[in-house]
Amino acid sequence: MTELLQQTVSGLTTGLVYAALALAIALVFQGTGTLNFAQGEFATLAAFVSFALSTAGLSWWLIVPLLVVLAFVFGAGVERLLVRPVEGSGPLALLTVTAALLLGSNAVVALIWGTDVRSMASPFGGAVYHVGPLTFTAQAIGGGALVLLAMLLCGLIFRFTPLGLRLRAVADNPDSARLLGISTGVMLAVGWGIAAAVGAVAGLVAAPTLGLSPELMTNALLLALAAVTLGGFSSRLGAVVGGLLIGVLSNLASRYVPGIGGDLQLVVPFAVIFLVLLVRPQGLFGRASTVRA
Amino acid sequence: MTGLLEVTGLTAGYGGVRVLHSMDLTVAENEIVAVLGANGAGKTTLLRALSGTVKAGGGISFAGRALNGTSAARIARSGLGHVPQGRGTFTALTVEENVRLGVISRPASTRAQADGDLDRIYDTFPVLREMRRRPAGALSGGQQQMLALARALMARPRLLLIDEPSLGLAPLTSADMFSVLARLREEWSLSVLLAEQNARASLKVADRGIVLARGRVVAAAPAAELAADAGLRAAYLGESPDGLTGVSS
Amino acid sequence: MSVAPGPIPRRVVVALAAGSLLLTAACSGRADESSGSGAGSNTGSDEPIVVGMSFPLSGPLSGAAAVADGAAAYFERINAEGGVGGREIDYQVLDDAYDPARQAENARQLVDQEDAGIVLTFGGISSATAPYLNGQKVAHVAFGTQAALSDTDATPYTRGWFPDGSWEGQVVAQHIQDEQPDASVGVLGIANDLTTSQVDGMAAAGLTPDKVLTVPPGVVDLTSQLNELRAAGVDTLFLAVVGPAQPATLRTMANIGYQPTTYLYSAASDLATSVGPAGPENATDAFTAQYFKDPADPRWADDEGVQAFKEDIAEYGDEANADSYLAIEGYGAAAAIVAALEDSGGEGGDAFTEAWDSIDGIDNPAILPDMQLSAGPGSRLVHQYRVLQFDGTSWQDAGDVVDADDLAQG
Amino acid sequence: MATSISGPPTRTEGAAPTPTPTAAPALAELRPMWRRPVTWAWTALFVVALVVPFLISDYDLFKATRVLTIAIAVAGLNLLIGRAGQISAGHGALYGLGAYTAMILVKELGWAWPGAVLAAVVVSGAAGWLIGLPALRVRGLNLGLLTIAIAAIFPLLLSRFEGLTGGTIGLQLAGSPITPPAALALTPEQFQFLLLVVVLAVVLVLLRNLTTGPMGRAVEALRVNPLMARSEGVDVNRLTLTMFAISSAVAGLGGALGGLVLASTVPDSYSMFFSLTLLSACVVGGSRTWAGSLVGSAFIVYLPDVISQQIGSTTGGQWSQLVYAVALLLTLFFLPAGVAGGAGRWLARLTRRLRRRSHA
């Protein structure tokens, strides 16, 4: 029983990282209508930049907001410069562009920082807390709180600000939005920017636990894709809940379902993708009418 | 005569296919002009060319400013509203969010009155007030048409392009719709360019009408005159196939 | 899908395709048919000895580029000293991105185009290239722990450089049995043949682990597995994971307060990429069954072999690799290859493997003191181990030199 | 687009008949096959391909053979993506399935290679049919996701079922079983290249005929608008499954020949990355041109090698990956219809202009 609880807790902790990345993927999807395969690499890049900044002596509490701003500018710039030219060429070309971005940013990270793993100290310290039989690390608690905060902020922006209203309008019906005087191009770039910022927080939180390497988010990306499918591409909340569920599910399934085992751990999220798409293509939280063809 | 909207030699199309051929058109202040024509005549394309969602050639001048090459978003902000065919509702947003989105293209000087306008709109369309917290996708067709009008009005447009408001509505509802239009023109000092297949109903509220066929103006006259011309209606507003079947009106 | 582009005049497109094919044809003319097999056995001449290398220089395993860099540094040093018997070593490094098809292609290019007499390949995918090189009777030195690379009957021209993975399992199992006979033993590794062979080795030494958990390559967060091991009461853990997962796991163990007696996999116990990133305090008291010197370990600061390596890598290679365990592994291999070449009088497959197999007791800059290279089981040159223990800054001896040759008998 | 409300009008307009660009090729279609320039061009290419093996080295042939095996798979992908309008991000797995099937039959059961290749085609085709089942419900990017899930799981399953697949080190043969008959006096590389040229030619002719006849019209309708296709009497479900099965069988054919030529199959070869590479070959070459399969395959096989040879240091691998990514991006920016498609259009414009000038 204790182990079951502990497994659930650690599933939730890692699930938060998937959730943030899934949210980023969903944001891009809702605006641009494509899956950004490079979302994980963007997060890795952010983690390395934060590493460079902290090596340069910046305080961690300065790095977080700075990084969010940098990631926003980066994401918006990528949309503007590299994604915009192919927006009219169909979903396959868009998807291929994101695959090229994945390869490119992966190479850039490896060129600048090398392929060896680097350790990044947890900004929350190494304390361990015991609640009953369960163990929580300061990193898990602090990192979890940071991710939650980022997701909450993102939710607030979308729900309650005029900017969020415009973003949602463009995601809902871009043609109509244009007729109302909304510059859809600017909104798409802003959407990519916010997505990159949320993803950056995911990378930042994952790095101290996993160690910095160009492969930091490779698996997280796959799990986040499963999470978005599970939650529904049209739902931001769905992506977050999907991430948490995937985190817990893949932990528990590899532990308790006979025949799966750790080596097939990655099969779980993909089995989830499979089942969800077949049974409920719009995902748990999505609405059928807004699933893009 | 100089009107609010002056169009000369307008051409437009999709890809390699030209749909509008050298079209002239004028809409005066506070005037309702009905654009009539069969399915595929080019009505929708005309409206889209004016609002900048379809590439157009020729001259478009709105309130004395040339609109050629201007982005759709900027045209919307210059006081030219477009209620698209199918209403363009943001189905996932609430009714009130839909209406408020209209404010974006409002002239900055009238921003302060936005809340007052919202009340006026709710007074005109009480059903929207009732349902303002509901997702817009839950509205009926007629209610969505009202919502689209309400949203366009929130931008305080000087000219409103309305595309097939009666499409898919029950006859009674669409009659309501046309009478509302006449009222709105007075209350909001609007000009309206109304694209319709339902010639009889639209000519009742319009001051003038123009008839399109195969992307050209084939007739232009005061509304009453057009309404009386049975021959014209039979020739252009009946089921005349015009060859461009792939292009919707 | 996107709007269909209009049909395209196909003749034009076809012409383009034809052009691309002809371009291929122009790459190189058809080589003289005679130089097919037994490549490069130009004994006695003063032509360069061509050593081909196919390594993952890009992609997820691009860290292995350091191995190639270390080897290249040694070859350069030899060239600077006048070469092998007056012949220069002409080494060619190609990227295979750890794609077996590209490695096979590279092997053909190296043999066919460059006339390589020895081909070095990296990793388990070497067994995919071995049949071709053996068919060409070209000497093949593979950097892989796989048992298949020790099978000199099936592939008589293929030689493995470092030990077979199962031997390490045997050595570790024996150490555990000597130190804590009642331990509850767990293995946590990557789901591949390396972990399988290590577990097989443990079984051969009479130790069956209570729990074996494996994860797919690339999975870095092993918290779930650690929870399971702890819940199962495992108090002695053989940690056979590699790459970023290894330091991450050590850190997680420290974080969640799970501190079994830990044995690290030899190739994932160095200061630069494993113990260092994990935080030395999180690896203190860990054991490893080791055979190479870690150039980052302060213990070897004055070691002759390590000093030579550091000088050469700074002079001829990428100085960033001066602390790299992988680079000294490649450096040591190059030294062994040069030693075999000096004895063989030629790099043809037969001559080279014969010289390799007759190596018996020579020194090597990469291996631990009190060890020597000699052709052992499976004709692997490295088969001696010493269990080391990490004291927080350095790996110290925690046992005697053990030879896999003896283990295989017992 | 996002909602059904604004969608339909746009779509009908996009699909409006485009008389100007189609006119010339449509006329050409009326000419008998042997009089069409395209037939001559393909024939010339085929003849060139038959001569090439006697001009270039065995190494270059081996590499070109790999291009051809991948081109077969990409041609299958072109059928699915460019013609039937279905995305598959899992063709790497089907290529691998073909390779493993053929390898197991040759190595473990001692089959002759032609039989093993045929069996691999059947197995991959059947697998493709199964993958097509979800495609009846799911379209577009969702289908892409579904198929990428297959691509990601495939290598893990290969490693897991060690008894059959040899686990992570895979299956190897001492040499390729595809050897020339003694009477031909060819090297194995020459024979393999010629064999692949013939196989690719046959595959392309079959696929082309498939997409030009009555079935082609049904496939086109399926791509443009499945609902409309249904109303025109096309059995959409059956056609979708058929397209998946054929496309996958073709990919399996490429894989089987590729695996046997290499004499080795390893899970690492058929990773998700490989599936995405095939997809990028399809896009780069041009998914709607058959020659695009050849151009796209050459792009993904030669470009990384050329770049890494230009850079050629032990730290050059990352640069080559970066340059590859940039090349991919530039192709997408400037040649949205793919290299073959883009070049085709450019030359078509040129010939039109020349023709007009000569008429004047």
Image (cartoon, rainbow, N blue to C red):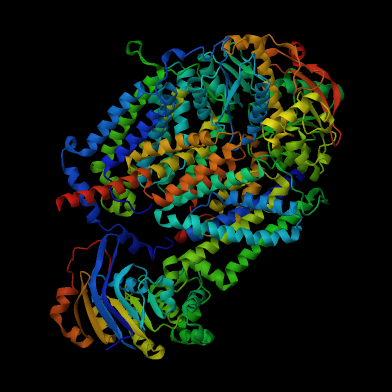
- Frontmost residue, D188 versus D350: D350
Q: Is residue C165 visible?
A: no
| Residue B25 lies in quadrant | bottom left
> Which residue reaches farthest left?
B231
Q: Quadrant of residue C366?
A: top right
Considering the image in quadrants, where does the C terminus of chain A appear? bottom left
The residue shown at (43%, 35%) is D127
* Residue B157 higher or lower than A19, as above or below: below
User: Relative to A72, is C27 on the left or the right?
Assistant: left
From where the camera sits, is residue A164 visible? yes
Looking at the picture, tell me which residue is in the foreground, A249 or D155. D155
List x then y, in percent, for residue B30: 34, 88
Farthest bottom residue in view: B186
Residue D320 % position (x, y): 53, 39
Label count reads 0
Residue A192: quarter of image: bottom right
Which residue appears at 62% of the width and 54% of the height? A19
Q: Residue at x 70, y 51 (%)?
A: A52
Relative to D219, does residue B111 appear above or below in the rendering? below
Q: Nearer the viewer, residue C244 or C113?
A: C113
Above or below residue C202? Residue C317 is below
Q: Position of residue C27 (x, y in %)?
A: 41, 29
The answer to which of D145 and C94 lies nearer the viewer is C94
Report the side of A202 relative to C24 (left or right). Answer: right
Decide: is A188 above or below C194: below
Quadrant location of the N terminus of chain A?
A: top right
List x then y, in percent, for residue C290: 77, 25
The residue sitting at 31% across, 25% down in the picture is D50
